[in-house]
Image (cartoon, grey):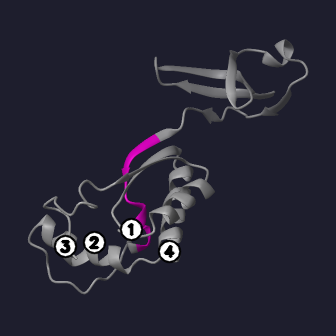
């Protein structure tokens, strides 16, 4: 058992903030929040947190990890008059250019940024036709809970937003 001493505990449902409390954790599960838990659990190890905030992880319900390396890209494309043109001229070209290694590092960058921001669960709307397995291993390597979703209709190629080959 581990006790985090002197934390600011933020609870979301119902909303509640408790300052200067202890949190007892056993087998990765919070078993108690309160005062003087080291007295209740004398054999537990503990860590002084000096008022640091402890709260549930944030869920990011929409992301595109395959595009993590494309920030600030200087793409040589004409101005796009609509969303479909943007997809055709930029994003679907990027999709086809990705290889396993670039997808892995793109996903790793996004995973680490998510963790640094407090996100512990991410839903990745993966649109690249190849290397889906590589993106999932990135999430596993970064210790994020994962939910993977292919972009709607991408495999069937019947959706109007999906590119043809």
Q: Which comes sooner in the sequence, label 1 or label 3?
A: 1
Residue 86 lies in what quarter of the image?
Answer: bottom left
The residue positioned farthest toward the front in the image shown: 156
Q: Is residue 107 magenta?
A: no
Seen from the viewer's position, the closer of residues 52 and 74 is 74
Q: Nearer the viewer, mark 4 or mark 1?
A: 4
Q: Which residues are magenta?
A: 59-69
Where residue 100 is drawn, which disc sits there? 4
Seen from the viewer's position, the closer of residues 6 and 77 is 77
Marks 4 and 2 close (CB-CB < 8 Å)? no
Name the spot of residue 64 as percent of width and height, x first: 37, 59
Q: Which residue is mark 3?
A: 164
Q: Is residue 61 magenta?
A: yes
Please, is residue 150 above or below residue 21 in the view? below
Q: Residue at x 54, y 64 (%)?
A: 108
Q: Which residue is mark 1?
A: 67
Mark 2–mark 1 Cα distance, whole angstroms, equals 8 Å
Seen from the viewer's position, the closer of residues 50 and 36 is 36
């Amino acid at each position: 058992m581990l006790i985090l001493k002197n934390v600011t505990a933020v609870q979301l449902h119902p909303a509640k903030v408790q300052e200067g409390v202890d949190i007892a954790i056993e087998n990765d599960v919070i078993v108690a929040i309160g005062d003087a838990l080291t007295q209740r659990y004398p054999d537990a190890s503990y860590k002084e947190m000096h008022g640091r905030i402890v709260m549930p992880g944030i869920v990011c319900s929409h992301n595109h990890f395959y595009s993590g390396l494309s920030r600030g890209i200087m793409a040589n494309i004409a101005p796009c008059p609509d969303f479909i043109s943007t997809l055709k001229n930029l994003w679907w070209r990027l999709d086809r250019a990705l290889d396993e290694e670039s997808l892995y590092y793109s996903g790793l960058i996004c995973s680490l940024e998510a963790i640094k921001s407090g996100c512990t669960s991410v839903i990745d709307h993966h649109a690249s036709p190849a290397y889906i397995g590589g993106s999932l291993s990135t999430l596993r390597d970064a210790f994020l809970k994962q939910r993977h979703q292919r972009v709607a209709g991408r495999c069937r190629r019947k959706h109007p937003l999906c590119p043809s080959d």
